[in-house]
Image (cartoon, rainbow, N blue to C red):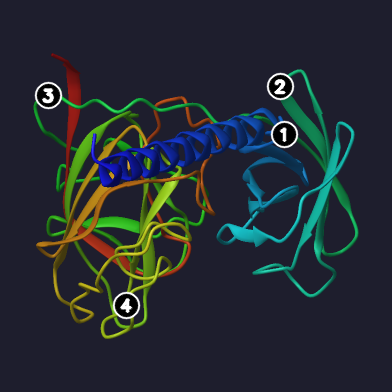
């Protein structure tokens, strides 16, 4: 064999050895990192006993770098806020977050214990009062790749509030000339029927400056607000509040009829706003502020937000998944 061929062969073997060694080290490193995952890491559905009520909450804990745990926390109100560090002491953990929509006061402080694949502890509110909480791992919500759709259901009969109820006595919901409307800030409207996976087609309009939303399964808010012309954000028109930002702001002028086509299967959501796909098959991490509960593994109703501003609907059509092929 020619000398130059031997030289090429030796270089090839050396390069191959380097690649194999690198792959081995990468796999070893990856395995080591996976083995060191703390049992607190993941997403947790929480319930807080707050002033005589059970209020849903949510926590996500993630690894950052070699040893730091960070996360996101949905408190009693508002959107999920970042957690700069979750401190660990044996089975105990703690962190704090600045106030968001809470009254004047201190940061929110959370102290908890991990035991038997569940967590519990206390939340110290801005006024210094403490409230107990419990939490369980957020469930996997499987995605149905080949759904069979059932017959559409018109939840609004254009006559009265049949199929709906409110969450409080301060209700401003009425039906006038075939239009379902809330004339001013008041109670939220909740469907009697509950759903798991579905398509929703709805038409709505709002006056200038108003703010509302539709809660899917009563837990995940698709924002409705007078935001035309603003840069898209997860807290603006078409966003999944605090989690998923639309790729464009498709809002029309206040006072115009607008529409959403929303598909939710498992945790994956698609939002078409006024004919434009603004969120395409994205994963909703957890419940949003104002959710009815944190029982993500269960079917849930639709809730239309009425506690922020006026809103009107002229259709609300649900097509649920019937079964799998």
Give the Cα separation between the discs numbered 3 and 1: 42 Å
Figure quadrant of residue 79: bottom right
The residue at 79%/75% (across/down) is 104
Give the Cα separation between the discs numbered 3 and 4: 33 Å
Q: Around disc 3, counting alpha carbons within 10 Å, would you say few (fewer than 14), some (14 to 19), or many (20 or more)?
A: few
The residue at 45%/57% (across/down) is 243
Farthest front residue? 2
Q: Which residue is mark 2?
A: 117
Query: CB of mark 3 within 8 Å of CB of mark 4?
Result: no
Quadrant of the frame with the N terminus = top left
Give the Cα separation between the discs numbered 2 and 4: 43 Å
The residue at 51%/46% (across/down) is 291
Frontmost of labels 2 and 3 is 2
Determine whether, in the image, residue 109 is placed left or right of residue 214.
Answer: right
Can residue 45 be seen in this snapshot?
Answer: no
> Is 253 rendered above or below residue 149?
below
Q: Earlier in the sequence, mark 3 or mark 1?
A: 1
Q: Around disc 4, counting alpha carbons within 10 Å, would you say few (fewer than 14), some (14 to 19), or many (20 or more)?
A: many
Frontmost of labels 3 and 1 is 1
Mark on residue 226?
4
Q: Position of residue 140 (x, y in %)?
A: 46, 27
Q: Earlier in the sequence, mark 2 or mark 4?
A: 2
Q: Could you say whether the residue bearing mark 1 is in a helix, strand or loop?
A: loop
């Amino acid at each position: 064999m020619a000398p130059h061929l031997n030289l090429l062969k030796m270089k090839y073997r050396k390069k191959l050895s380097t690649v194999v060694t690198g792959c081995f080290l990468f796999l070893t490193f990856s395995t080591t990192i996976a083995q060191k995952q703390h049992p607190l890491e993941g997403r947790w559905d929480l319930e807080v006993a707050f002033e005589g009520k059970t209020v849903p909450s949510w926590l996500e804990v993630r690894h950052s770098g070699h040893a730091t745990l960070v996360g996101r926390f949905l408190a009693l109100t508002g959107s999920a806020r970042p957690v700069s560090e979750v401190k660990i002491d044996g089975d105990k953990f703690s962190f704090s977050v600045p106030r968001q929509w809470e009254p004047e006061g201190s940061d929110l402080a959370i102290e908890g214990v991990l035991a038997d694949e569940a967590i519990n502890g206390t939340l110290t509110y801005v006024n210094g009062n403490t409230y107990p909480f419990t939490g369980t791992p957020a469930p996997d919500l499987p995605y149905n790749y080949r759904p069979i759709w059932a017959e559409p259901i018109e939840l609004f009969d254009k006559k009265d509030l049949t199929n709906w109820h409110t969450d409080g006595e301060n209700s401003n919901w009425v039906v006038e000339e075939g239009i379902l409307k809330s004339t001013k800030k008041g109670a939220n409207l909740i469907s009697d029927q509950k759903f798991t996976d579905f398509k929703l087609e709805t038409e709505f309009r709002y006056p200038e400056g108003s703010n509302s939303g539709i809660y899917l399964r009563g837990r995940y808010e698709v924002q409705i607000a007078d935001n035309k012309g603003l840069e898209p954000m997860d807290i603006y028109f078409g966003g999944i509040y605090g989690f998923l930002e639309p790729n464009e702001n498709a809002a029309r002028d206040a006072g115009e009829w607008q529409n959403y086509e929303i598909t939710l299967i498992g945790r994956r959501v698609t939002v078409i706003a006024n004919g434009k796909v603004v969120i395409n098959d994205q994963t909703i991490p957890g419940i949003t502020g104002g959710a009815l509960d944190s029982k993500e593994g269960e079917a849930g109703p639709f809730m239309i937000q009425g506690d922020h501003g006026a809103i009107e609907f002229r259709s609300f059509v649900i097509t649920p998944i019937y079964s799998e092929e």
